[in-house]
Image (cartoon, helix red, strand yellow):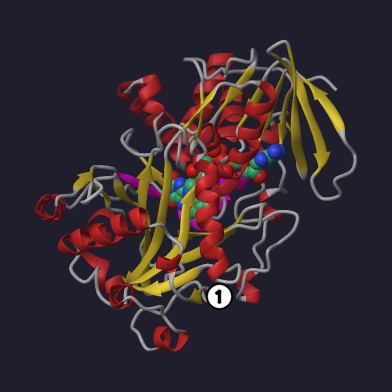
Amino acid sequence: MNYDLIIVGAGPSGIFTALELIKKNYNKKILLIEKGTRIEKRNCPKDKTLECVSCKPYCHITTGFSGAGAFSDGKLSLSYEVGGDLPKLIGNRVAQEMINYTDDIYLEFGADSKIEGLEDNEGIKDIRRKSIEAGLKLVDCPIRHLGTEKAQEIYYKIQEYLLDNGVEIKFDTLVEDLIVENEVIKGIKAVDSKSKKKREDVLSDKVIIATGRKGADWLKNMCIKHGINHSAGTVDIGVRVEVRNEVMEKVNNVLYESKLIGYPGPFKNKVRTFCQNPGGFVSQENYDNNLAIVNGHSYKDKKSYNTNLAILSSHNFTKPFNQPIEYGKKVSELVNMLGDGKILVQRYGDILDGKRTWQEELDRTNVKPTLPDAVAGDITSAIPYRPMLNILNFIQSLNIVVPGFASRETLLYGPEVKFYSNKIDIDQNFETNIKGLYSLGDSSGWTRGLMMASVMGVMVARKIS
Ligand SMILES: Cc1cc2nc3c(=O)[nH]c(=O)nc-3n(C[C@H](O)[C@H](O)[C@H](O)COP(=O)(O)OP(=O)(O)OC[C@H]3O[C@@H](n4cnc5c(N)ncnc54)[C@H](O)[C@@H]3O)c2cc1C
């Protein structure tokens, strides 16, 4: 079979490529290949089972139309300063213009017109004053909050729009390999992702890889096999923190999401807050190699009593080590091992006391975990000293901005590790050193969020149309 363009992965980066090509009247044969299913068939059974049943052959939280976007909190970060390194490639001004353009597309498909973090100037000033006192940088980033359920509605409309406009989508199809000859892309090798039968070669002289964080490991293997130039990037090791809404009330109301960055001693690594979910729920995503990774999201209407956010410690390795993805996996495996394959949770006070947390101790506190099957235990036995100390010292600083954040009952869940540490070498057209092969979104290592991944999709469409 021959196509003018094959897009691998129907996450935000892949689908915004297809959307923009339609807008640009590309009028050529586009095939979008997605390992998972249609968005309306995506279903995490945890609502009923209350615990993760490790769905096979894939986890619905991250796999299927709209990728990790479907069960995300749907927070669109509207500043070029947030969401990855893409601005380093295209420039800050262009990045901001493209964010504004892409935001309008989200609005066309029904996103809420309200933008958080713009209104309460006195409130923002006060939070910034405290951040300065704490030695933290407060990044200005307006947020458009879709909410998990609304995000799904919007992505459903996009799915139908793509299909109505002639984009062919092969669901439940896994791309196993690339066909590369003499450093030129010729197509891909696909297989039915459920039966692992019905193998086929699909040909095209243009292939876009947009496989997300889950596909980062596969892409790394493709890089080694086919000589795609790449380099080791940053690995983020962290925890998801959960406190009562009352503690975060001011920041939640004024900013919705506080983007704070610090360089705590003694190591001075970059440590930052990420993905804050007021009234949200801590969630679990499962990777194909059976890793359970913690995350968080929030609905527009259904609210919990808690706010969760990630604290991530960034690490760059030097020679001779160049396997950040492997490093992140080993740390996650260790945390999973202590939790018998589940997410671990520990109270901050127990960490200070040098002891594990017991389930009955969790039951006594104001903060009731919103991830009911998280296992009480000791994450400090698994997370390495350096990121762990960075996180604990950062929490102390955050307590100045948000009094009560470092309370003894604050919950820390682990592991929260971000697998975008492999960075693909791409030129200004987002093309790799393999002619006709493009790399986009979180799997490329250049983005780490819905908006920036979507922007990269729009931009590659403009380059190839
Ligand atoms: C619970 C949760 C909450 C989040 N909340 C936010 C938020 O509020 N704001 C924000 O900015 N970001 C959030 N994120 C991150 C955001 O979802 C991602 O940054 C974004 O989805 C990346 O888009 P992408 O297109 O690069 O990849 P993805 O969305 O990961 O999509 C990649 C797609 O490729 C498919 N795929 C992978 N490998 C193959 C293969 N070999 N063959 C075929 N298909 C393949 C996958 O099934 C997937 O559908 C959240 C993520 C999670 C999991």
Q: Quadrant of the N terminus?
A: top right
Please determine whether, in this image, residue 227 is positioned above or below residue 52.
above
Q: Main secondary structure of the magenta part?
A: helix
Q: Position of residue 366 (x, y in %)?
A: 33, 83
Query: Which residue is found at the position 31% from the left and 22% from the top?
Result: 93
Q: Quadrant of residue 175?
A: top right
Q: Is residue 238 left or right of residue 284?
A: left
Q: Would you place residue 63 above or below residue 252 in this image?
A: above
The residue depicted at 29 percent of the width and 76 percent of the height is 349
On the rendered structure, is 57 left or right of 348?
Answer: right
Pick whichever, 227 or 244, lies toward us.
227
Residue 150 visible somewhere in the drawing: no
Observer able to see residue 82: yes
Disc 1, ligand 1: is the CB inside 8 Å?
A: no
Q: Residue furthest top?
A: 182
Residue at left 11%, top 56%?
130
Is 257 situated above or below 409?
Answer: above
Which one is in front, 120 or 242? 242
Q: In this view, which residue lies farthest toward the front?
A: 320
How many labels were placed on the picture? 1
Neighbor class of circle 1 (other Cα within 10 Å; few <14, some 14-19, many 20+) is some
> Is residue 132 or residue 91 the one in the foreground?
132
**Element type at marker 1?**
loop
Q: Amino acid at mark 1?
A: Asp
State the residue lying farthest toward the right. Answer: 198
Residue 85 magenta: no
- Residue 164, position in %: x, y? 71, 34
Residue 54, percent across and down? Answer: 68, 64
Residue at 49% in and 15% down: 427
The C terminus: image quadrant: top right
**Which residue bears the numbered disc 1?**
373
User: What's drawn in magenta, residue-wise?
Assistant: 142-157
